[in-house]
Image (cartoon, rainbow, N blue to C red):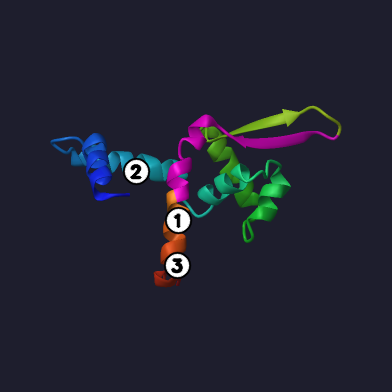
Amino acid sequence: MKEKQRQKLVKEVLGSPRNQAEEVRALQDTIYVTGGKWKLPIINAICNGNHRFREIERALPGITTRMLARELKEMEANQLIKRTVNPNSPQQVEYTATDYCRSFGDIILEMIKWGKEHRERIVRS
């Protein structure tokens, strides 16, 4: 993002005078809904066409069945994903991203871009 665009966005989002408490609350709300090790990777998996539980699970090496089930329930409660039960035999359950979730898409793309650009600086412990 160019500096001029960034300054315009800063004024638009943060306002003047800045309200530090409101900014912190907004960050905390975002982290609450999308935070944790698995939520963003789950969103990414669903947006990449993995709609069934096992497809999502296979797309995320290292996630346990229990953790995926818990995260999907929480994400459904926060309206990030929609759970649809198809009454076929056998019963099929599919998960899709909501418009609310898709509104976060540009941010996820920027996070992926940032991660790729700075991978060599990241120290994992």
Residue 86 visible from this viewpoint: yes
Q: Amino acid at mark 3?
A: Arg
The segment highlighted magenta reads: 90-109
Q: Position of residue 86 (x, y in %)?
A: 76, 29
> Mark 3 vs mark 1: which is more N-terminal?
1
Residue 123 visible from this viewpoint: no
Q: Position of residue 12 (x, y in %)?
A: 24, 35
Q: Position of residue 110 (x, y in %)?
A: 43, 50
Q: Amino acid at mark 2?
A: Gln
Identify the residue position indicated by label 2 in the image.
28
Tag in front: 1 or 2: 1
Q: Secondary structure at mark 3?
A: helix
Asked whether, in this view, residue 12 is left or right of residue 28, the answer is: left
Asked whether, in this view, residue 22 is left or right of residue 125, the answer is: left
User: Which residue ends up furthest to the right in the rendered image?
Assistant: 89
Asked which quadrant contains residue 104, the reply is top left
At x 80%, y 33%, the residue is 91
Callout 3 touching callout 1 (CB < 8 Å)? no
Tag in front: 3 or 2: 3
- The local crowd at label 1, few if under 14, some if 14 to 19, many if 20 or more residues have their Cα within 10 Å, is few
Q: Amino acid at mark 1?
A: Lys
At x 41%, y 58%, the residue is 114
Q: Please, is residue 89 above or below residue 44 in the view? A: above
Q: Please, is residue 90 above or below residue 58 in the view? A: above
| Distance Cα–Cα, label 3 vs label 2 | 25 Å
Q: Secondary structure at mark 1?
A: helix
Identify the residue position indicated by label 1 in the image.
113
Residue 117 in magenta?
no
- The local crowd at label 3, few if under 14, some if 14 to 19, many if 20 or more residues have their Cα within 10 Å, is few
